[in-house]
Image (cartoon, rainbow, N blue to C red):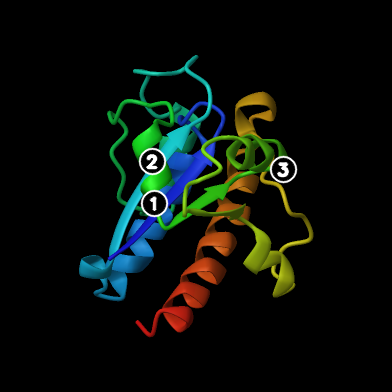
Amino acid sequence: MLKVTFVCTGNICRSPMAEAIFTHLVKQAGLESHFEIDSVGLSDEEVGYTMHTGTAGVLRKHNIPHNPKRPARQIATADFDADYLFAMDHGHLRALQRTHPQSRAVRSLFLTDAHQAGLVSREDVPDPWWDGQYDRAYDLISKGCAALFQRLRAQHNL
């Protein structure tokens, strides 16, 4: 089973959006038994808060199942047992690389696959909490999830 964890700042916008979209793709493909999917934040500032209403709204608009009541949580030592930690931006990636260097988790930018495939022109997912652009975040994250899912399926013969 592959453990995939998405990482952003507070775990209320980008990472739970990626978790929901990626989970949806996995379920559509009937591969739930091959993945454990999660999301976390680097900061403790939003711990216990629920998904941002902008994130919940855009997921609902696109018929992506999600749990808007799931409380945000901060990354913990146990999260570094994941196979993959996907950072929403370069700052998150730097923080992940500095923490638990002995971890076997592959740490990379979430949009790398989509960027390399020419699906997106950027490597970072801007935080919609700051600018309110949840539709833009959804577009980037859905393309990122599709490209990532395609690579992981091929890489792990799923």
Label 1 vs label 3, nearer the camera:
1
Q: Which quadrant: the N terminus?
A: bottom left
Instruction: Please tell me the numbered disc located at residue 79.
Output: 2
Residue hosting label 3:
90
Q: Name, please, the residue furthest toward the top.
A: 45
Image quarter of residue 68: top left
Label 2 environment density (alpha carbons within 10 Å; few <14, some 14–19, many ≥20): some
Image quarter of residue 153: bottom left
Q: Is residue 26 visible?
A: yes
- The amino acid type of the residue labelled 1 equals Ala
Residue 146 vs residue 20: left or right? Answer: right
Label 3 environment density (alpha carbons within 10 Å; few <14, some 14–19, many ≥20): some
Q: Name, please, the residue furthest toward the front.
A: 102
Which badge, 3 or 2, is on the more N-terminal residue? 2
Q: Position of residue 107 (x, y in %)?
A: 57, 52
CA gap, disc 2 to disc 1? 6 Å
Q: Which quadrant: the C terminus?
A: bottom left
Mark 3 in CB contact with mark 2 (< 8 angstroms): no
CA gap, disc 3 to disc 2? 19 Å
Residue 24 vs residue 18: left or right? Answer: left
- The amino acid type of the residue labelled 2 equals Asp
- The amino acid type of the residue labelled 3 equals His
Mark 2 lies on a secondary structure that is helix
Q: Position of residue 91 (x, y in %)?
A: 70, 36
Q: Name, please, the residue furthest toward the left.
A: 33
CA gap, disc 1 to disc 3? 19 Å
Q: Nearer the viewer, residue 37 or 51?
A: 37
Residue hosting label 1:
82
Q: Position of residue 7 (x, y in %)?
A: 51, 41
Residue at (39% x, 30% y) in the render = 76
Q: Is residue 16 above or below residue 48?
A: below
Mark 2 in CB contact with mark 1 (< 8 angstroms): yes
